[in-house]
Amino acid sequence: MDKPELALQPEELEIVKSILQQFVPNYPVWAFGSRVKGTARKYSDLDLAIITETPLTFLESDNLKEAFSESDLVWKVDIVDWATTSEAFRQIIRQKYIEIQ
């Protein structure tokens, strides 16, 4: 199986990584969805799964979403909290993802 590539410009990836390091530095983060599958369009959202054993706090989640919303990224970032995700959706994510943190 070919290694998936992330459909982001280097400067976009740096913004994403910087925000993740600021707000969720201790969790692995997986990108999945169209930007990993090769089906993304210019303004397709970026799907990120924060790999947690216990749910993120409301403050952690809210701060992360706000940081992405206020960033220079021109597309939306959707956050999935692994601890609150169904096993069925986890299986879909596991099919094709890229660990970015």
Image (cartoon, rainbow, N blue to C red):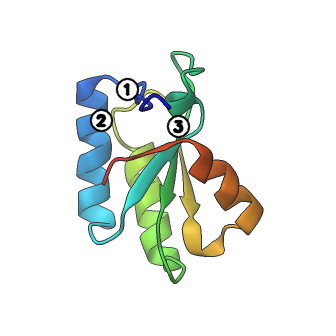
| Disc 1, SS | loop
Q: How crowded is mark 1: few (under 14 residues within 10 Å), some or many (20 or more)?
A: some
Q: For this rendering, which residue is in front, 90 or 70?
A: 90
Label 2 belongs to which residue? 13
| Disc 3, SS | loop
Return the x and y of residue 72 as percentages of the image width and height. Answer: 33, 33
Counting labels gives: 3
Q: Residue at x 58, y 75 (%)?
A: 83
Label 1 belongs to which residue? 8
Return the x and y of residue 29 as percentages of the image width and height. Answer: 40, 57
| Disc 2, SS | helix
Q: Residue at x 67, y 67 (%)?
A: 85
Q: Tag 1: residue type?
A: Leu
Q: How crowded is mark 3: few (under 14 residues within 10 Å), some or many (20 or more)?
A: some
Q: Tag 3: residue type?
A: Lys
Distance from disc 3 to disc 1, alpha carbons, whole Å, reads 13 Å
Q: In this view, does 64 lie above or below 37?
A: below
Distance from disc 3 to disc 2, alpha carbons, whole Å, reads 13 Å
Q: Is residue 19 left or right of residue 55?
A: left
Label 3 belongs to which residue? 76
Return the x and y of residue 88 as percentages of the image width and height. Answer: 76, 61
